Image: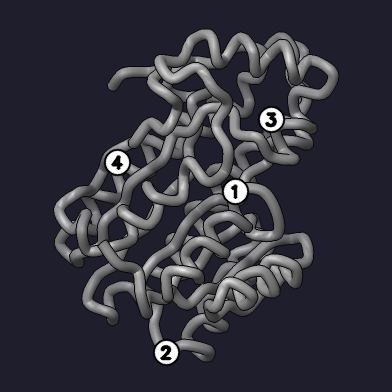
């Protein structure tokens, strides 16, 4: 299982899971493009400190032109694209509550980033993946979708859409040797989780742990092995799957 010399684009890479993916993959020899609406300088520096190659790009995934610019930056820097990790999502900035109290603006924002953003980025890289002879797309979904998390219906629905997008796109792109899979993690110890849960964080994480077979809270490093496997050729016959990395909460 190797990702050495694979050119990998990671969205939402300025902090949290995105940064962890970039640094881990770079340390394993991949060539990274880190994209985010926030500055990715610290992520790029950490990847280089780990002995890897990385560049940063400004990226609003809701803007198709910026998604295309990310792909061009990868091709200019490395000459090809082998994989895309669609990690960018609106999460910490969302406010939970009963479904009929969610504002239309919040609903639309969640769909724009969490669903349209993935669609845009997939469109931006697909021709380069075809030219490379195939590749891997990893979409980050959530336990929210596989479990059916209440009181955050905009987030839960958007992540369920990611799973549907993953399955449909896997069927479309299989003939091009492009694999499309999704991850469904439970709550991970990141800044976004802290922001989303707010003052209820400790109690919420306690409840989540109680429902897991492995009763501890996920950390970003728990996901990097699965991402690397999905990008590597070791998973070359795996596509259309949603892999739960949730400590054994939802047993698919």
Q: Position of residue 158 (x, y in %)?
A: 55, 33
**Which quadrant: the C terminus?**
top left
Residue named by callout 2: 79
Q: Position of residue 150 (x, y in %)?
A: 60, 12
Circles 1, 2 touching at the beta carbon (< 8 Å)? no
Identify the mark nearer the N-term, 4 or 3. Answer: 3
Residue named by callout 1: 17
Circles 2, 4 touching at the beta carbon (< 8 Å)? no
**Which quadrant: the N terminus?**
bottom left
The alpha-carbon separation of the residues under discs 1 and 2 comes to 26 Å
Q: Residue placed at 19% from the left, 65% from the top?
A: 177
Q: Nearer the viewer, residue 200 or 178?
A: 200
Residue named by callout 3: 107
Quarter of the view holding residue 67: bottom right
Q: Residues within 10 Å of mark 1 (few under 14, many from 20)?
A: many
Residue named by callout 4: 167
Q: Nearer the viewer, residue 175 or 189?
A: 189
Q: Secondary structure at mark 4?
A: helix
Q: Secondary structure at mark 1?
A: helix
């Amino acid at each position: 299982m190797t990702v050495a010399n694979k050119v990998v684009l990671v969205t939402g890479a300025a902090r949290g899971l995105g940064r962890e993916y970039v640094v881990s993959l770079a340390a394993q020899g991949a060539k990274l493009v880190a994209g985010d609406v926030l500055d990715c300088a610290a992520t790029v520096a950490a990847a280089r400190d780990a002995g890897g190659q990385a560049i940063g790009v400004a990226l609003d995934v809701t803007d198709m032109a910026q998604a295309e610019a990310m792909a061009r930056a990868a091709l200019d820097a490395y000459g090809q694209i082998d994989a895309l990790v669609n990690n960018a999502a609106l999460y910490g900035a969302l406010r939970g509550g009963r479904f009929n109290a969610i504002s239309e603006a919040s609903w639309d924002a969640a769909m724009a980033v969490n669903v349209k953003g993935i669609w845009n980025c997939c469109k931006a890289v697909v021709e380069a993946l075809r030219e490379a002879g195939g590749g891997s797309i990893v979409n980050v979904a959530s336990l929210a979708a596989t479990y059916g998390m209440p009181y955050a219906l905009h987030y839960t629905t958007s992540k369920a859409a990611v799973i549907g997008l993953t399955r449909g796109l896997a069927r479309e792109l299989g003939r091009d040797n492009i694999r499309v899979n999704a991850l469904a993690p439970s709550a991970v110890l990141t800044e976004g989780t802290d922001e989303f849960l707010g003052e209820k964080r400790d109690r919420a994480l306690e409840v989540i742990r109680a429902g897991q077979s492995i009763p501890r809270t996920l950390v970003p490093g728990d996901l990097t092995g699965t991402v690397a496997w999905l990008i590597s050729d070791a998973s070359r016959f795996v596509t259309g799957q949603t892999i739960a990395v949730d400590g054994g909460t939802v047993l698919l």
